[in-house]
Image (spheres, rainbow, N blue to C red):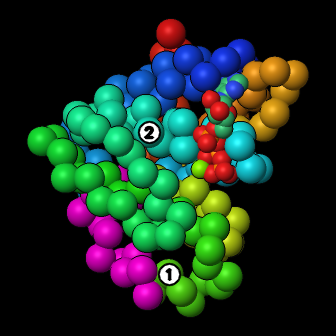
Amino acid sequence: MNLFLPDEAATIEFAHCVLRALPQDVAGWTLLLDGELGAGKSTFARALISAAGHEGPVPSPTYTLVEPYRLPRSTIYHIDLYRISDEEELRYLGWNELDDGLRLVEWPDRAPGLSARADLVLTLAYEGSGRRAELKALSERGGALIETIEPA
Ligand SMILES: Nc1ncnc2c1ncn2[C@@H]1O[C@H](COP(=O)(O)OP(=O)(O)OP(=O)(O)O)[C@@H](O)[C@H]1O
Ligand SMILES: [Mg+2]
């Protein structure tokens, strides 16, 4: 699915749409957030985490690599791979143990093998003063989810 997001509010609204389409139990789901510097990956992640019930700031995981959010309905891991340089380092951040929640991953291209283990990839790209969003399925259940998304 492909849509134009004219401003930040549209990115936030789209994150809400994706959250609504996700199942109650998001354990084991992985959503990759792709796009160049400043494309809106963190804006999307922040909106989704806040809408899922987190109150307060959503700091960038650039240095911590993973920021966990234990929310009433679900656990969300906000992950930033900007500083990792190869797939092997995923083990150090305990990737496999983060399977009891939703993994939201910025800079997934740092670990190309991840696409094979993810459900969805959202690619954000600059377009005029807004952004172009493309949401693609990487798994069967990811494809089924996209079918149910109703953009506002
Ligand atoms: N649809 C949109 N149209 C225009 N501006 C937007 C849109 N969505 C987000 N922005 C703005 O883009 C800027 C960068 O956003 P953000 O920090 O989310 O990007 P990022 O992809 O996480 O960047 P980084 O690569 O540095 O982590 C913010 O100022 C945000 O308000
Ligand atoms: Mg970011």
Q: Quadrant of the N terminus?
A: top right
Residue 116 can be seen in this image: no
Please provide percent x and percent y for residue 130. Answer: 76, 22
Residue 77 can be seen in this image: yes
The residue pinned by badge 1 equals 90
Magenta-highlighted residues: 92-103
The amino acid on which the numbered mark 1 sits, given as a three-letter code, is Leu
Q: Is residue 130 left or right of residue 113?
A: right
Residue at 42% across, 51% down: 59
The amino acid on which the numbered mark 2 sits, given as a three-letter code, is Arg
Label 2 CA crowd tier, 10 Å (few <14, some 14–19, many 20+): many
Height in image: 140 above or below 23? below
Dot 2: element: helix
- Does the beta carbon of the residue at mark 2 sit less than 8 Å from ligand 1? yes
The residue pinned by badge 2 equals 46
Query: Looking at this view, is 97 or 143 the one in front?
Result: 97
Query: Looking at this view, is 42 or 75 the one in front?
Result: 42
Determine the CA span between mark 2 and mark 1: 22 Å
